[in-house]
Image: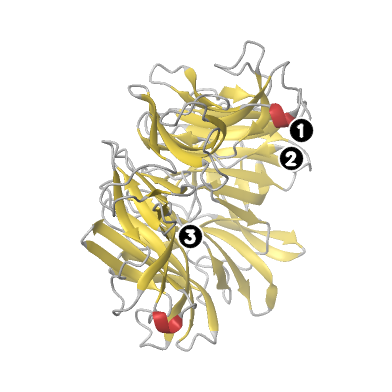
């Protein structure tokens, strides 16, 4: 996803009209956790992640904390088993001094791999560092034995750096293959500058903690004397142990070039593209200027965004997206100012706003805004899905909003969450000509057969009872994150209700026989909403505000 390694899609309560086709009957498989936290937004469940074994991972913030602020807990839930806490505020911080405990300062997005192991960043506190500014942070991971292990901490010597250089804090983390944890760390010590303090490290149980790259790393395949010269950004990983990132390179004369890189499992670096390179798919004279986000496919292909420039248009910049299969095979996917497929040249891509990495079948998604050919009239968001060289329009602003009442049209769209088998979940908003300022938010499913359906909307009723009884609550907010959709079509999400209760649920995107039933609701005006039904749920252990 473009610059969105921790993306949250929030659906706010809105207005629904009369019944319409295109509604997907939702199958609720599990209630993972339930709680009631009142109106205070500091408490509640964060959006969960789910793997192919249906293990769910999520943070929660609970009242009654031992420190100022909420009591934060990292919880996992497995099918048929009670949810269990991995780490929480006040729990002994593994690997830290004996009296250290976790504070409530956890990085919001923990990661979960295919084997069910998790990794997270947190802060700890002991008797020697009462000040928040002095509280050390660390990266923890669950090992192959199931034990929690500290793999890096502030004050620790950073592998692959000169004597005296140590970690200070940690930023986004990811899993690159089962058991592998990749993270960015900040450094301090001799020779570390403010623009050269961020590097990337990788941990496995077998290899321990190893440097991937940092400013000062020598570079093969580029002119002699060049090295990485500034902070490494745009962390992307795949399941083959490769890591993608952007970082400028410079020589002793101070000549600097923006560049895009991929690390290899063997430890080397591959230069994917650099500033001043000719731009594939554009006329001679265009060259790359700077690089944005990068995503890696399981086979190592790189999908990346970049700005380009040509001398006559300097300093005007346009952006595009490219897919590189090999150093000599880079394909233009979409470019700002280029005609939109099927428009006859009357519309062009105005801005490229997001993309998803191609799955095993090569299918990807692209989010872009459209405009007239002269780029004066703006037409808003559009969503495209397909092979990189054959993207098909799925929805755009002004189209009928599938599943919404007659007259409702899409207003905004977001970059979808995609799994390996081709399911996409996309958040959007819609409105009607009669009430253009009243937006209806919804969550749509685009399936492997090419069907777009509304699966969930704020204002709908949802049965939170895990058994045969019925306990309907009206949805107020929905939160879904990247990593919340597995390859089996299971979607993990957090729902907040109008009575201030919340829950973590797993729903199936697989079709069920009966359609949902719409009911009338009053949210400012008389509205209609989806009514979700549950199937029998076995072995569910709802948590009453204690997950």
Q: Position of residue 10 (x, y in %)?
A: 61, 53
Q: How many numbered discs, if any? A: 3
Q: If you read the primary sequence from the N terminus, does the residue marked by circle 2 or circle 1 appear first?
A: 2
The reply to whether discs 2 and 1 touch (Cβ–Cβ < 8 Å) is yes
Q: In the rendered image, which quarter is residue 258 located in? A: bottom left
| For discs 2 and 1, the disc positioned in front in the rendered view | 1
Residue matched to label 3: 415
Q: Is residue 31 above or below residue 391?
A: above
Helix, strand or loop for disc 3: loop
- Residue lying furthest front in this view? 253
Question: Label 2: which residue?
Answer: 42
Q: Residue at x 31, y 38 (%)?
A: 241
Q: CA distance from mark 1 to mark 3?
A: 32 Å
Q: Residue at x 29, y 74 (%)?
A: 281
User: Taking 61 as reference, is 5 left or right?
Assistant: left
Q: Nearer the viewer, residue 252 or 142?
A: 252
| Residue occupying image coordinates x 44% and y 82% | 313
């Amino acid at each position: 996803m473009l610059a969105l390694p921790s993306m949250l899609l929030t659906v706010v309560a809105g207005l629904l009209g009369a019944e319409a086709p295109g509604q997907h009957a939702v199958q609720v498989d599990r209630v993972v956790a339930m709680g009631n936290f009142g109106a205070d937004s500091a408490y509640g469940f964060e959006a969960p992640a789910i793997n192919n074994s249906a293990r769910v991972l999520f943070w929660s913030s609970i009242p009654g904390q031992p420190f100022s602020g909420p009591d934060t807990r990292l919880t996992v839930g497995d099918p048929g088993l009670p949810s269990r806490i991995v780490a929480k505020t006040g729990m002994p911080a593994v690997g830290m001094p004996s009296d250290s405990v976790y504070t409530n300062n956890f990085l919001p997005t923990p990661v979960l791999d295919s084997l069910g192991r998790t990794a997270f960043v947190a802060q700890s506190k002991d008797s020697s560092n009462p000040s928040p500014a002095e509280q050390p942070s660390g990266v923890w991971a669950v090992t192959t034995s199931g034990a929690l292990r500290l793999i890096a901490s502030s004050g620790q010597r950073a592998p692959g750096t000169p004597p005296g250089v140590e970690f200070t804090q940690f930023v986004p983390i990811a899993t690159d293959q089962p058991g592998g944890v990749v993270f960015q760390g900040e450094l301090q010590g001799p020779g570390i500058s403010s623009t050269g303090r961020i590097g990337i490290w990788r941990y496995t149980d077998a290899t321990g903690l190893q440097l991937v790259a940092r400013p000062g790393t020598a570079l093969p395949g580029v002119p002699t004397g060049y090295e990485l010269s500034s902070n490494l950004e745009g962390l992307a990983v795949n399941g083959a142990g490769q890591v993608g990132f952007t970082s400028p390179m410079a020589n002793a004369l101070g000549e600097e070039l923006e560049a895009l890189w991929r690390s290899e499992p063997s430890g080397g670096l591959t230069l994917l593209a650099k500033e001043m390179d000719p731009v594939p798919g554009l006329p001679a004279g265009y060259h790359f200027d700077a690089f944005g986000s990068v995503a890696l496919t399981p086979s190592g292909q790189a999908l990346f965004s970049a700005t380009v420039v040509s001398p006559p248009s300097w300093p005007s910049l346009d952006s595009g997206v490219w897919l590189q299969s090999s150093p000599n095979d880079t394909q233009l996917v979409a470019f700002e100012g280029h005609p939109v497929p099927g428009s006859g040249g009357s519309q062009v891509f105005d801005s490229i706003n997001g993309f998803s990495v191609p799955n095993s079948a090569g299918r990807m998604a692209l989010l872009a805004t459209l405009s007239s050919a002269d780029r004066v009239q703006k037409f808003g968001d559009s969503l495209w899905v397909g092979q990189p060289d054959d993207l098909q329009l799925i929805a755009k602003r002004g189209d009928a909003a599938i599943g919404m009442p007659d007259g409702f049209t899409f207003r905004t769209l977001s970059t979808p969450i995609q799994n390996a088998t081709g399911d996409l979940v996309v958040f959007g908003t819609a409105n009607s000509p009669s009430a253009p300022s009243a937006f209806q938010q919804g969550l749509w499913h685009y399936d492997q057969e090419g069907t777009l359906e509304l699966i969930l909307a704020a204002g709908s009723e949802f049965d939170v009872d895990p058994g045969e009884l019925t306990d309907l609550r009206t949805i107020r907010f929905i939160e879904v994150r990247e990593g919340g959709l597995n390859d089996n079509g299971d979607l993990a999400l957090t729902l907040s209700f109008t009575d201030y209760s919340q829950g973590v649920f797993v729903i199936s995107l697989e079709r069920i026989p009966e359609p949902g039933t719409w009911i009338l609701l009053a949210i400012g005006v008389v509205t209609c909403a989806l009514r979700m039904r549950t199937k029998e749920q076995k072995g569910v252990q709802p948590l009453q505000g204690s997950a």
